[in-house]
Amino acid sequence: MPSAAALLAWYDRNRRRLPWRAEPGAAADPYRVWLAEIMLQQTTVAAVIPYYERFLTLFPNLAALAAAEEGAVLAAWAGLGYYARARNLHACARAVAAAGGFPRDAAGLRALPGIGAYTAAAVAAIAFGQPVVPVDGNVARVVARLAAIEAPLPAAQGAIVAAAEAFGTAPEARARPGDFAQALFDLGATICTPTAPACALCPLRAGCAASRRGIAADLPRKAPKPERPLRHGVHFWLVDRQGQVLLRRRPPRGLLGGMTELPGTPWRAQPWNDAEWRAHAPMPAPWRAAGEVRHGFTHFELRLALFAADVPDIAADGFLRPRAELAAEALPSVMRKCVAVIGG
DNA sequence: AAAACGGGGGA
DNA sequence: TCCCCAGTTTT
């Protein structure tokens, strides 16, 4: 069994300073811990920091976020991805505000929108000092190596969680649950990295089965991923005589749910021919080819053809924005790419 | 159990 | 290019 004491001693000297973290010895703010954890789901620290700072300015506390319109929250989230997180964040803020505060235990937190097993444990440990171990990608990698778990993910997840909980029962870990969790995060982020782990610098090396066997860099093993299919779409850049561009809102749920887009066709496996995409144009217009955009989503690759036209007046569903203000519009990244190609 | 759900940074 | 990231929800 690796040494929790050694891990915490390493953490006390090497901890990362992050905007949502309390200073050593200070109490963590549950609102900030929760907000950061939601943003950090499947998202790197570097990507989160500017969004976190902006969010805290717009919504400095739970009451402010609960009082905001969902559209304002989605707009502040634009570009960060996984937009269901923003909708759940808002719903969660209202539920917690109505209840008078966050539940202090993992089971209570787990019942809230957008909070799964990982986030419940992270908030319980970091904000409320509960003796639980959140297992994210970092912790899973560290623990799979410590215990030399060779079964591939996701089948190995149960064994990894069990090993993490066993590590967390050490008295030093139970005395500082939040620091123990964050120590595992920091170790995974800076020493026990996915490729080429710096085992020579690791405080847990003596207790690491994978390091001993020389297979640390090979763990955790992962099941092969299905290949991503290709999809095609066409989007339209329609400008009126006042220089206003037609935009519209996507359906409230599903892919990019509730976000703003240029009007376009559905995205499908087969490319669109001329007659097909014209049937989806917001109105008849002298369309001219205006470029192409490629964008990768988690489960498919997207190729968009862009067509532009100028008309005196726009008569179509959607809303208008001055072309010059589009850079400031809250757009998902794929639509930001379209604007950059056409209007850039 | 499997699929849906974004986007950016690093190897 | 592929992989990974402080995962959750829906089917």
Image (cartoon, coloured by chain):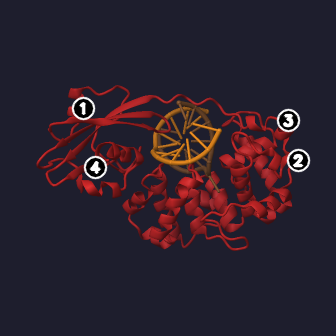
Chain colours: A red, B orange, C brown
Counting other residues with Cα less than 10 Å from the Cα at mark 2, is it few (<14), some (14-19), or many (20 or more)? some
Residue indicated by mark 4? A248
Residue indicated by mark 3? A213
| Of the image marks 1 and 3, the number of the one nearer the N terminus | 3
Tell me which chain the residue with mark 4 is part of.
A
Q: Examine the image and state in which quarter residue B10 appears.
A: top right
Say left or right for A168 vs A18. Answer: right
Residue indicated by mark 1? A277
Counting other residues with Cα less than 10 Å from the Cα at mark 4, is it few (<14), some (14-19), or many (20 or more)? some
Q: Is residue A11 above or below residue A224?
A: below
Tell me which chain the residue with mark 1 is part of.
A
**Towards the viewer: A341 or A131:** A341
Residue A286 place in picture, x, y as percent:
15, 37
| Of the image marks 3 and 4, the number of the one nearer the N terminus | 3
Q: Secondary structure at mark 2?
A: helix
| Same-chain check, marks 1 and 3 | yes
Residue A35 place in picture, x, y as percent:
55, 62
Q: Is residue A171 above or below residue A312?
A: below
Q: Secondary structure at mark 4?
A: strand
- CA separation in Å, label 1 and label 2: 63 Å
The label nearer to you, 1 versus 2, is 2
Residue indicated by mark 2? A206
Q: Is residue A153 above or below residue A72?
A: above
- CA separation in Å, label 1 and label 3: 58 Å
| Of the image marks 1 and 2, the number of the one nearer the N terminus | 2
Residue A12 place in picture, x, y as percent:
78, 64
**Towards the viewer: A21 or A168:** A21
Q: Residue at x 82, y 39 (%)?
A: A210
